[in-house]
Amino acid sequence: MLLYIVKHLARAVGVFLTVTFATFVVMYGNGAGVARATLGMNASAQDVQRRMADLGLDRPLFVQYFDWLGGLFTGDLGRSYYTGQSVAGALGVRVPVTMSLIIVTLVLTVIISVFLGVAAAYYRGWVDRTVQVVAGLGAAIPSFIVAVVLVLVFAVNNPILPATGYVRPTDSVSGWLASITLPVISILIGTLGAAQIRGSVIDVLSRDFVRTLRARGISERAVVFRHVLRSASGPGIIAFGLLVVAMFGGTIFVEQVFALPGMGQLLNQSAQAGDVPMVMGCVLVTTIVVLVVNLIADLSNALLNPKARTR
């Protein structure tokens, strides 16, 4: 098990270095273009060269990358080209907003997906068809369209929940729940993994050991939730790890619709303005979160399914 963990940690580090360096090359590779974007398109060549020197963009790309990488250990991720704000400071304010959406959505996704997937696999018939239709429609409709519809129904036509804004849980728990309800539902509808759970449960229900457990008189609830669900959890766990990536993508658009001061809004604004350090900071956080979630998913799968460790 220890070797399994070490291998996955090494793989995660390799992916992290590859993703961040590739993004760094794309963002910082055109130093003159970055400098000109901060000065304006009418800037002279001399001004562009001076700006490149001020920002350190005239140095070799590998030197710039390793300087940035070294800043990770000190918390120095640079400063915004336009506002001068610390990237770490901006992320410290924005990331909790986005992570609150992701965490709540992920918890609800797991609970609802397991319930719907098991129900579809066990009862089949109209229950199965209904779950598949609902999951298919949710995956097909973009999250920002769902968000707009929810705003019109529950905030404009029927002012039940706030349409915009974010309340921190330290200020008011009820206000926080009200402010994230519509955004969470917008992301949740497109990230249900009931189909993966359904397929795995159907496969396990047809195995011989299930018939043996039933023949021994074990209750149906124990057979399904203690034995079948555990054996079928592997593909579902991996699917939920992949869904985190989809949740980040949906969050970017949802935060724009609901005017939430999260990382998605920061990334969108920084990308439009060409604020490269802020973009790199957002990419850094996203990469780390996705890698950690997938690492946890792999380790959980290995604990529940010993065959995964041998592979």
Image (cartoon, rainbow, N blue to C red):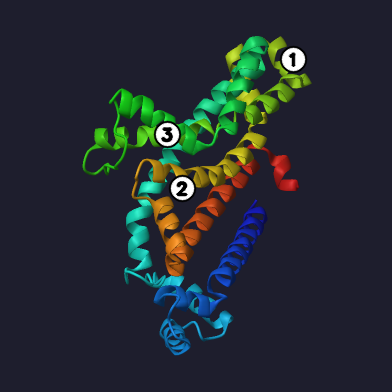
Q: Is residue 13 above or below residue 199?
A: below
For image coordinates 37% across by 25% down, the residue present is 153
Q: Residues within 10 Å of mark 3 (few under 14, many from 20)?
A: some
Alpha-carbon span between mark 2 and mark 1: 47 Å
**In front: mark 3 or mark 2?**
3
Residue type at tag 3? Val
Q: Secondary structure at mark 3?
A: helix
For image coordinates 66% across by 19% down, the residue present is 121
Q: Position of residue 225 (x, y in %)?
A: 59, 22
- Label whose residue precedes the other's in the sequence (2 or 1): 1
Mark linked to residue 148? 3
Q: Is residue 172 above or below residue 231?
A: below
- Label whose residue precedes the other's in the sequence (3 or 2): 3
Residue type at tag 2? Ile
Tell me the residue that label 2 is attached to: 252
Q: Position of residue 224 (x, y in %)?
A: 62, 19
Q: Quick one: 211 or 29, which is closer to the camera?
A: 29
Proximity of marks 1 and 3: CB atoms separated by less than 8 Å = no
Along the horizontal axis of the image, is 191 left or right of 260? right
Tell me the residue that label 1 is attached to: 211
Residue type at tag 1? Arg
